[in-house]
Amino acid sequence: MNEEREFEERVVDVNRVSKVVKGGKRFRFSATVVVGDGVSRIGIGFGKAHEVASAVRKGVERAQRSMKTVKVINGTIPHSLISKCGGARLFMKPAAPGTGVIACEPVRAVLELAGVRDILTKSLGSNTTKNLVKATLNGLVSMRTKEEIEKIRGVKL
């Protein structure tokens, strides 16, 4: 119970889906939720239910179960990269202190809850919310620091 309080949660997107049946339409909701501690741990979750509140609750539970640690150095990322998920391509570049988070809404939610304060981003492909959130998380998790690269290669950079 104590872990739930230290994480901040943000609902990125709520989508209404309808199914036409004999008596009319049946509505369901899907929610995209991001959970993070604002320092280095982040998780994303997707929930589906007949009510919005239930979908958000399911998304938060799944996000807390899928927490990952990301590398943040002085409030920015170690290096620039392009990450992909489905049709979404996202370019991320480290920025100088005081720049802020220059990103679209789904990407901003993930970066701010991961503890990134200064970064430049650009969405190059599809702007689907779900894929942008996944691409952002994939990019943050795949980052390597200079020390890790030196250790892998066995040389001093």
Image (cartoon, rainbow, N blue to C red):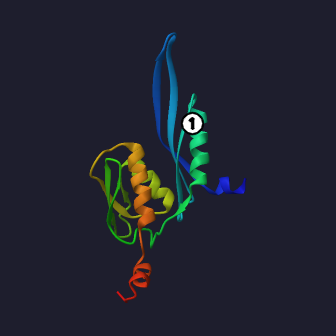
Looking at the rendered structure, the secondary structure element under dot 1 is helix
Q: Position of residue 86 (x, y in %)?
A: 35, 48
Q: Residue, x 52% and y 10% (percent of image)?
A: 23
Relative to 105, residue 39 above or below: below
Please name whichever residue, 108 or 60, is drawn nearer the observer in this view of the structure: 60
Answer above or below: position of 91 versus 20.
Answer: below
Which quarter of the rendering shows the C terminus? bottom left
Vertical placement of residue 4 versus 55, above or below:
below
Q: Residue furthest right?
A: 1
Residue located at (42% from left, 76% from top): 145
Q: How far across and down, in percent of the image, does residue 22 sit? A: 50, 10
Quadrant of the rendered image containing residue 153: bottom left
Asked whether residue 96 is in view, the answer is yes
**Looking at the image, how many numbered discs can be counted on the residues?**
1
> Which residue ends up furthest to the left in the rendered image?
124
Splitting the image into 4 quarters, where does residue 81 fall?
bottom left
| Mark 1, residue position | 55
Q: Amino acid at mark 1?
A: Ala
For residue 147, what is the image quadrant? Answer: bottom left
Q: Residue at x 51, y 38 (%)?
A: 31
- The residue lying furthest to the bottom in this view is 156
Q: From this viewpoint, is residue 38 visible?
A: no
Q: Residues within 10 Å of mark 1 (few under 14, many from 20)?
A: many
In the displayed structure, 154 sits above or below 37; it is: below
> Where is residue 85 drawn, in percent x and y?
37, 51
Who's the residue at 57% across and 28% down the image? Answer: 50
117 left or right, relative to 68: left
Percent position (x, y) of residue 154?
40, 87
